[in-house]
Amino acid sequence: MSTTAAELAEQFGLRTASGPLAGDSALPVHAALAGLFRGGALRRGTAVSVDGRARLSLAYALAAEPSKRGYWCAVVGVPELGLSAAADLGIDPNRLIALPDPGEQWLRAVSILVETVDVLILAAPAVPPPGGMNRLHAKLRERQAVLICLGRPLPGTGAALTTRGPHWHGLDAGAGRLRSRTIRVAATGKLARPGTAVVSLPGEDGTLGRALPAVS
């Protein structure tokens, strides 16, 4: 690791970017989302994009299962993190690094964090130059981390998820309270299993609801 990454790891008590199960070639995802990926998991060393109105919630849902199993996560470029919602979805706040405003050096900050975490959620303020993106992908492969990009896919993204909706449940003729939210998630890309899943995000208990069978 670089000196900066080593200092970051020491500050947060991180092991390495490979997490507690260094031999794994993929990181698990909730069963409700597994059908959207080839192999049913997030392949290490790759990038995934998430777009649509519910993109941040879906990104947290993707990161939740790795977090539950002891992997470290980071969120970069998201001023309003919604940490309570992230925790409800299963992300361990004690294993989460937040960098709401990385400034102009955001690509360098991401490269450093990739050395020390397993899953990194990024809202990129701009499209990086080709050379910078190539170096980032090389770093992802070297450190076996997963990058989840919010918004349009960045160059080299292996799977693209797009949310549609949401549809809220619970209000009846203007009365009652909102209990759950249903969204549709469409998947494309070489690392995706093309199709659509319907999930409750969140369900009535605040967590990710099980998907209906994916359809093409």
Image (spheres, grey):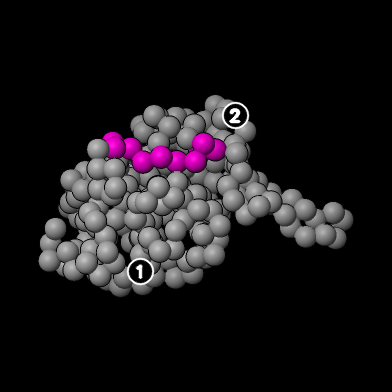
Q: Is residue 183 visible?
A: no
Label ID, residue 185: none
Residues under labels 2 and 1: Cα distance?
Answer: 36 Å
Label ID, residue 99: 1
Task: Say few, some or many: other residues with alpha carbon within 10 Å of mark 1 (under 14 / 14 to 19 / 20 or more).
Answer: some
Residue 214 placed where, x, y %? 56, 30
If you read the primary sequence from the N terminus, does the residue marked by circle 2 or circle 1 appear first? Answer: 1
Going by the numbered disc 2, the residue's amino acid type is Pro
Residue 11 placed where, x, y %? 25, 70
Tag count? 2
Nearer to me, 71 or 29: 71
Does dot 1 land on a helix, a strand or a loop? strand
Q: Quadrant of the N terminus?
A: bottom left
Does dot 2 land on a helix, a strand or a loop? loop
Going by the numbered disc 1, the residue's amino acid type is Leu
Instruction: Classify 172 as above or below 98.
Output: above
Residue at the spot x=38%, y=45% of the render? Answer: 48
Q: Verify whether residue 28 appears in magenta.
A: yes
Instruction: Classify 130 as above or below 34.
Output: below
Nearer to me, 30 or 80: 30
Instruction: Classify 214 as above or below 6.
Output: above
Task: Say few, some or many: other residues with alpha carbon within 10 Å of mark 2 (under 14 / 14 to 19 / 20 or more).
Answer: few
Residue at the spot x=30%, y=73% of the render? Answer: 103
Residue 38 placed where, x, y %? 40, 30
Residue under label 2, please give it.
213
Point out the stretch of residues depicted in magenta.
Answer: 24-33
Residue at the spot x=34%, y=55% of the render? Answer: 72
Nearer to me, 50 or 84: 84
Residue 66 placed where, x, y %? 40, 47
